[in-house]
Image (tube, rainbow, N blue to C red):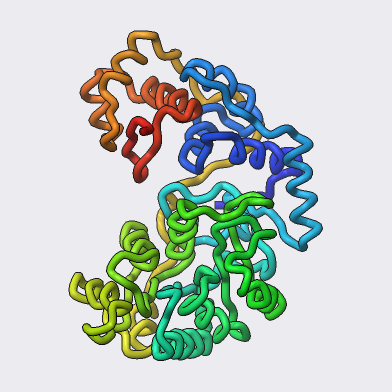
Amino acid sequence: MTRLRLSPSQRVSWLRLIRTDNVGPITFRTLINRFGSAEAALDALPHLARRGGASARIPSVSEAEDEIAGLEALGARLVAISEPDYPSLLRHIPGPPPLLTVMGENSLADRRMVGIVGSRNASAAGRRMAQMLAGDLGRENYVIVSGLARGVDAAAHQASLESGTVAVMAGGLDHIYPRENIELARAIVGSGGALLTEMPLGWEPRSRDFPRRNRLISGLALGVVIVEAARRSGSLITARMALEQDREVFAVPGSPLDPRAEGGNHLIQQGAKLVTGAHDIIAELTHADPSRLPLFEMDDRDQPAPFAMTDPSDDDRVRLLEALSHTPTAIDLLIESTAIAAPVMQILLLELELAARIERSGHQLVALRA
């Protein structure tokens, strides 16, 4: 498929749409598919949100233009999923970000990447292992992806500065976290690597933002290596997301007496590939095929809505609200139990999501917000 760059006006419209309250990647895609363009979706949003029982705050054109200008002042840019320099593997995850903010290397689209993540309070041996793996993989032309955290992440980035590394952030580009890694972030960009985030300028990372970041680490990579991780840790969230995205999962074994090894050892018991050196990873990934059928393709050309759709009735809304609960429920089950047609269900869920009355859990599960 030919990849085309957005026009300046399309870029502003895409940015306004994804920065609108309660519009995430899946809702963004649904709106584009339903209305044909970001401009048309923006026009429809206030009406949809009102029908859901609330109002939607849409950033103004000037606010979007200010964010773009702020990024350019930092030497960063927005990359749209429709454009050729969007990372190719990231297109193939559920709910890929429609827009990424990238500072640094321009040619991420076709680079083969491996994620290395692990404990923030890593042992000296854990940090050394991360450095060895990152250095050896870099010499085999793999780019290292990690989360810029202290410990294992920082060690992996540091060891792959010369060969190429990407740091995925949970906040805006102007909020490097942790602050102790600001110099490392500068070194990554200065050595030809990249910083990447889906969050806007000015965004300070919150605890809930790190799982979102973790799905991008695994989504960029052919496989993810867990070096040290406690039984309940963000690194294991990254491993779970990698499995959901059909990526390879590797783990470095550790002493049963070290709590930092418990998560990795458990992954190995569950089928993750045991790693003693980079050769174990390279052997598995040598024939990995990064060309997969895309889950998300769209073109933001100006065009009318692709098909007419009957608006939901009040009775439809009542039946759906009665069927929803705080337990995540499959959309197909909601359609079956309410006898609401799928296109009408799509609009009803859009209304409720824009009004912050429901939330998605996974790609096809929805629940009432607490």
The residue that appears at 26% across and 76% down in the rendered structure is: 262
Q: Quadrant of residue 11?
A: top right
Measured as percent of width and height from the top left, residue 26 is found at 46, 40
Q: In x, y percent, where is residue 126?
A: 40, 85
Q: Is residue 70 left or right of residue 139?
A: right
Q: Residue at left 77%, top 52%?
A: 70
Q: Relative to the observer, which residue lies in front, 361 or 105?
A: 361
Q: Above or below — where is 15 with respect to 250?
A: above
- The residue closer to the viewer here, 84 or 272, is 272
Whether residue 3 is visible to the viewer of this picture, yes or no, is no
Vertical side of 45 occupied by 244: above or below = below
Q: Let me know if residue 94 appears in the view.
A: yes
What residue sits 55% from the left and 71% below the top? 148
Q: Residue furthest top?
A: 314
Locate the C terminus and report the quarter of the image it occupies.
top left
Is residue 187 toward the left or the right of residue 129 in the image? Answer: right
Residue at 72% across, 60% down: 76
Q: Indicate the position of residue 295 as horizontal and vertical percent values.
A: 42, 48
Q: Nearer the viewer, residue 364 or 66?
A: 66
Coordinates of residue 2 in the picture (x, y in percent): 59, 52
